[in-house]
Image (cartoon, rainbow, N blue to C red):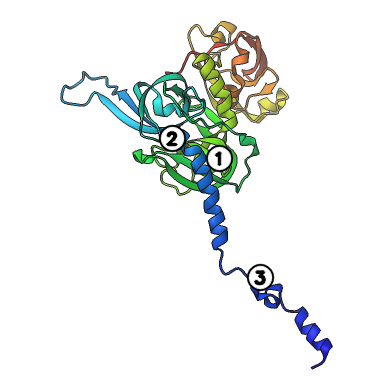
Amino acid sequence: MKRSQLISNDAFRSNEERHPEAIPASDDHLLDAYSQAVMRAVEKVSPSVVNIEVHQRLRSRRAPHPRLPQEARSNGSGFIFTPDGFILTNSHVVHHATKIEVALSDGHRFQADLIGDDPDTDLAVIRIDAPFLVPVSLGDSQSVRVGQLVIALGNPYGFQCTVTAGVVSALGRSLRSRSGRLIDNIIQTDAALNPGNSGGPLVTVGGDVVGVNTAMIAPAQGLSFAIASNTAQFVVAALVRHGRLKRSYVGVIGQTVPVPRAHARANGLAVSSGVLVTALEPGSPSEAAGLQAGDGIVAAGSQMVRGVDDLHRYLTGDRIGSRVAMSVLRSGRRHSVTIVPVERPSPA
């Protein structure tokens, strides 16, 4: 056989065929690297994860029965974020609690005080008085990318410090809180969550907390949600400082409805929906400003209002005491109503 033919045949052989010693025996090294990354993150964060046991008085309109339990107990998760005992968890874990107990990763138990609670973002801060705590800091959730490996830690069904791993499935989701308001910038993952995981941290392989695990869809598989750490940082600062997150209030009871095309064209509106005012709270800023049931709110200040959620987002704490021009449709014509929002009462 000619030398040129040997060279030609060799050109069609792969690098692995020409150098069989370069082929790895298996993918064990890849799996081992994955395992090592998860283990390092867990070793860094797990001392900060706590189990929260909550006592709540049973609410009933009937007179209490002496043979029936008057108190319910439930469990959730949280994590220490300051060396002096501040713990972040979900609002729905500790809301209406009569007693809160925290178990550290080493088994020691402490009674906790509720510092602040915000049902609208499903976040709460509690505090314990304990020595030698290991805090973990909140990372930057804006750096998270779809497909990134993340790890969820918590105490599902009371099983101490359970670890699950998955990937970020989607970013920028919205999730409705138990108070009815939307929580924006939710992180969706396929890391398995179960009852009791609520309030635990969602971390990267570097051990950075990028989310607070808050919910899963029970009938589905791999649909879990976490409140972004950047949202948590903003809320935590307000809860530690004031015990609540200040929001403005105008006293409107309304619903999202379509705006008739004829009305939108006649009034030069770029919206296809708005907020129909169905009722006004007595003595509220809206009633004082002359807003009427049947009005359709389509703008607040310079922002278009396409529905109730847009109005909620607009009514932040910095609107308190400021004059706000609301654009409303009344009998098919556009009017301006000036309202001065007040501080919103704390949710029940």
Question: Seen in the image, is 286 located left or right of residue 18?
Answer: left
CA separation in Å, label 3 and label 1: 34 Å
Q: Which mark sits nearer the N-terminus, 3 or 1?
A: 3
* Residue highlighted by disc 3: 22
Q: Quadrant of residue 336?
A: top right
Residue 107: x, y in percent? 36, 34
Q: In terms of secondary structure, where does tag 2 sit?
A: loop
Residue 143: x, y in percent? 65, 38
Q: Which mark sits nearer the N-terminus, 3 or 2?
A: 3
- Mark 1: amino acid: Gly
> On residue 142, which mark appears?
none
Of residues 185 and 287, the one drawn nearer to the viewer in this rendering? 185
- Mark 3: amino acid: Ala
Q: Which mark sits nearer the N-terminus, 1 or 2?
A: 2
- Mark 2: amino acid: Ser
Residue 346: x, y in percent? 47, 15
Task: Name the residue rendered at 46%, 25% in the picture.
Answer: 179
Q: In terms of secondary structure, where does tag 3 sit?
A: helix
Residue 339: x, y in percent? 61, 10
The quarter of the rendered structure image containing the C terminus is: top left
CA separation in Å, label 3 and label 2: 47 Å
> On residue 207, which mark appears?
1
* Residue highlighted by disc 2: 198
Task: Name the residue rendered at 71%, 24% in the picture.
Answer: 266
